[in-house]
Amino acid sequence: MNFIQNFPFFSIILSMFSGIVSSVLCPKAARWVNTFLISAVGIMSAILLGYLAQTGESYTYMMGHFPAPWGNEIRAGVLEAGMALFFCVIMLLSMLGGHKKLLREVEYSKHNLYYILVDLLLSSLLALIYTNDLFTAYVFVEINTIAACGLIMIRQIGRTIEAAVRYMIMSLLGSGLFLMGLCTLYDLTGHLLMSNIKESVAQLATQHEYTIPLLTTIGLISAGLAIKSALFPFHSWLPDAYGYSTVSSAAMLSSLVSKGYIFLLIKIFYRVIGFDIIADSKVINVLFVFGVLGMIFGSLSAIRENDIRRMISFSSVAQIGYIYMGFGLGTQIGIVASVFHILSHAATKSLLFIAAIGLTDVSNGSRKFQDLTGAGYRNKIAGVAFTVGSLSMVGVPIFSGFVSKLLFAEAAIGDNMKMMPAVIAMAVSVILNAIYFMKTVIRIYVPEHREDCQVITMKSEKVYAVTLICFIVLNIFLGMCSQPIVKWIESGLSMFG
């Protein structure tokens, strides 16, 4: 075995070990360990991506070299390695962009706990990306939930504690449904490894056996992960969780946590059940309906908000709706569009949260729209960054959001039954996005001289400014270099099979 093939295992174990080490370190040392960890995992992921792109094949890594059914497995392909690299980039930028705010919002004695939670969050996301064992996936789904809950409530204000409790309740409901689906699937097939399950499921489908239990299993797993990823109408916990947690937490929760669950669902569709069986089960029709509803009602809720961070949070409901609408189209290009939108939304939503905190800081800490007047002049880099993120969300060319919407439109045109609802929903959603995002952009660039507010320059906040510039470059890169990225996604999905 090539040494590079150990990198997924090293990444997961290193993340968990760093969390343990950070528990006995001072906060400053824990921060440096966390930064080193994310950077090291990102570098290993990049090297693995180059190796897999060169070989053109995925591979299976047996834990302890024990074969199934005794051993556990990791499976890596170009899509998994690329997604791990992308998640590391987003997490690193989110931590850097929100570091100074973290110092003010979280007690110093709890800083090392914060970095422990981030380490555990990274390990769980990597495990969801790489694991080839469904029960292992469930274990790390719970680790992900606990880490995310801790990141929400560590700020220790009333709204974050309430948000964490609501998040835990909804997450436990989703986890329960997911576990019930796994138990039923294990009862039907007798396997926990994804590839083994797929063989048994294909045999059951060919022989037309256990049709109703299999359909129920698909429904339970899909519903559980949809609830955990805040698909409408299971999103009630999301606005407070994103809106009142620390800015780094909000950026990571909105861009990474829900995407980890969605990526696991894609793996289950392709690698566990088989996409042909999923399409025939009609479960995707339910996902399509809720996805379309999320696109509309998430945007309507965002329009009614007078708080910039809660507005961005409700926008996430609409964007998650886009992803599930792509699933619901039941085609390869629909899944490709959804995967690309995972990247686009992660890059853009983190950018918006990090930029928004810069705008509120120069508005006496107020997040109300009327107090943000002229904030784009008082913090120029935050104003530019928020404008770029808004244009991407609306779908303006050269930005990543435009490519997402173009891919969704192409996927919808190929389905005669769902074309009209999908196209109409996208048109309405784009208009609604333009209303609340452009309203905010206009507000922050309305001239207003206020002597009571501080002015932040790029020289005074160098790390913050560099972080926003990196996010802007990443967004434009996704929008301008979309063709190779789409081919990478298609190649990765073909390896899933």
Image (cartoon, rainbow, N blue to C red):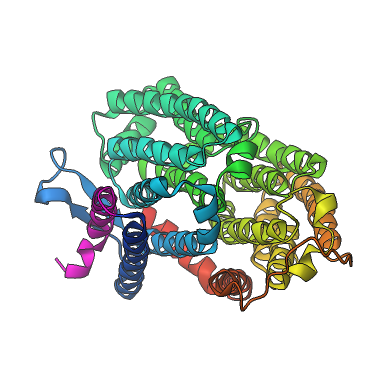
Q: Magenta region: which residues?
A: 1-25
Please name the residue shown 81% across and 49% down the image: 432
x, y (%) of residue 131? 30, 47
Camera-nearest residue between 271 and 222:
222
230 in relation to 106, above or below: above
- Report the number of discs: 0
Please name the residue shown 75% across and 59% down the image: 394
x, y (%) of residue 94? 51, 60
Name, please, the residue furthest toward the front.
452
Camera-nearest residue between 116 and 63:
116
Please name the residue shown 10% across and 51% down the image: 65
Camera-nearest residue between 456 and 224:
456
Task: Give the side of residue 293 with respect to residue 346, left or right.
Answer: right
Name, please, the residue furthest toward the bottom.
459
Is residue 259 in sight in this rendering?
yes
Is residue 121 within the magenta segment? no
Is residue 2 within the magenta segment? yes
Is residue 328 in sight in this rendering?
no
Please name the residue shown 65% across and 57% down the image: 357
Q: Would you say the magenta stretch is mainly helix, strand or loop?
A: helix
268 in relation to 55, above or below: above
Task: Give the side of residue 117 with respect to residue 215, left or right.
Answer: left
Task: Give the side of residue 316 with respect to residue 167, left or right.
Answer: right
x, y (%) of residue 63? 16, 49
Camera-nearest residue between 98 and 179:
98
142 in relation to 181, above or below: below
x, y (%) of residue 79? 41, 61
Quadrant of the drawing holding the N terminus: bottom left
The quadrant where residue 438 appears: bottom right
